[in-house]
Amino acid sequence: MLPRLQNRVPPPALCLLDLGRLRARRLEVTLTEDVLVVHGGTPLQGQIRVRGAKNLVSKAMVAALLGESPSRLYDVPRIRDVEVVSGLLELHGVKVSAGAEDGELVMDPTNVESASTDQINVHAGSSRIPILLCGPLLHRLGHAFIPDLGGCHIGPRPIDFHIRALREFGAVVDKTPEGMHLSAPNGLHGAKLELPYPSVGATEQVLLTAVRAEGVTELRNAAIEPEIMDLICILQKMGAIITVHTDRVIEIQGVPRLYGYEHKPIPDRIEAASWAAAALATRGEIEVVGARQADMMTFLNVFRSIGGELKITDDRVARDGVTGAEGGIKFWHPGGELKAVALETDVHPGFMTDWQQPLVVALTQARGISIMHETVYEQRLGYTEALNSMGATIQVYRDCLGGTPCRFGRRNFMHSAVIAGPSKLHAADLRIPDLRAGFAHLIAALAAEGTSRVYGVDLIKRGYEDFEAKLAALGAHVERP
């Protein structure tokens, strides 16, 4: 029977006057520097390019810690998450530098060292990546520290899966007010594990820990997203022995040492789908260079079912008369009415949870009643309130409105949405709650008539490279106040 895994030193005190001034300054920054003025109603038209997937690149950077020689990662996007992980790696002695090519990142882990809790806590709350450093640091240093974790507030994402897995490998976890300290006095050893839910983060944790653990690890009910498969490819390049069996079973045979890698990550399928939804919502046409059909097949089927049109160009096919040009996918609104659909988010190969927010904006323009049943994160429909303030008609429910009940049913979570359309959207002042909802709000502002002000827009930089420059390239009328 396999075990089932269940779901800082404070700064100097500030006087009240100084604290008040600090808060006023933060408010001033929010009101002046973190706002985008969007003049909506113009179809987006043109070409943009997506680079490596956010949800893979940061994990690939962590994997570099496991090697005994430098790693090179290509096509790395200029996003905030990359900056955060670079900072964490540098704190632990990894030399991170730009390579000769645009988007090339070189990581040299030759001199991995311990970092103080004060230094690590600087990054507390900015990302959930620190939890994934545990396995690699336990292998390299014998100890690790986890600060308070950040990320988008889209529902509880407990680290219980991670901690229980690390304990199964032999890690000792000590919880303190400043965070969690981990050690491995007897080293890490292979284990037989089963996840109650195919969590992407927990699967990454097991992979990054098992590859250098002594013995064989078997993980059941693992996540098999394209980003997971690409991480496995990276680890195999480094010398790991990993077998992906049927029925979500992954077997990892531990090896004593790993080496650096050279890798070009899969393109960001979330960003590609976000721009596709923007083309649909604004009645425009956007070619997403770098987007890859194989990773987006579920989304592409839904896009066509709604009434959108698309054209796929492979890398090997000449485009615009240029042989060997990089391929991509062109998305456009063909005119006429869009069609309502009923959808459920799910783990891969289902409809990705990060696709639903931008697509719901497009569904506000479809005729009829659409249903979106969110089964991955229980609090991911809060952004619909802002869409309703712009003229959308969206009602959220506690009930499972999909084809099958999900784990959130009867638990008082508003996790199903009914969208009635088409709705004429009008401008509004919007405040971004999280990364993906933020891009959905931005799409709504672009599709709406009038001028909107989008606050907290810099949060979008966590996962969308140069999005303001891309908007300008697509003919959007946006500006900083």
Image (cartoon, rainbow, N blue to C red):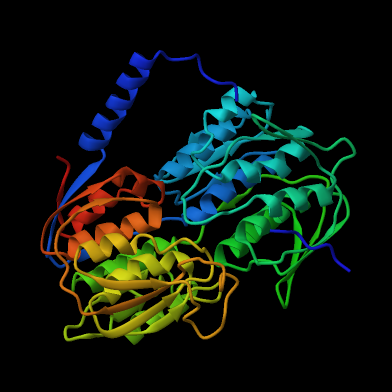
Residue 154: image x %, image y %?
47, 56
Q: Does 194 sit above or below residue 151?
A: below
Which residue appears at 32% of the width and 50% of the height? 432
Residue 295: image x %, image y %?
49, 71
Residue 278: image x %, image y %?
26, 67
Locate residue 434 relative to residue 363 in the image: left or right: right
State the image quarter where residue 21 is shown. top left
Q: Is residue 255 visible?
A: no
Residue 263: image x %, image y %?
56, 53
Locate residue 75 relative to residue 279 in the image: left or right: right
Q: Is residue 121 visible?
A: yes
Locate residue 369 relative to residue 77 in the image: left or right: left
Is 442 in front, or is 92?
A: 442
Which residue appears at 61% of the width and 44% of the height? 62
Q: Does 112 sit above or below residue 4?
A: above
Which residue appears at 49% of the width and 47% of the height? 151
Which residue appears at 66% of the width and 40% of the height? 65
Q: Quadrant of the C terminus?
A: top left
Q: Does 24 sit above or below residue 280?
A: above
Q: Quadrant of the N terminus?
A: bottom right
Is 224 in front, or is 344?
A: 344
Q: Quick one: which residue is furthest to the left in this view?
A: 450
Is 226 in front, or is 247?
A: 247
State the image quarter where residue 242 is shown. bottom right
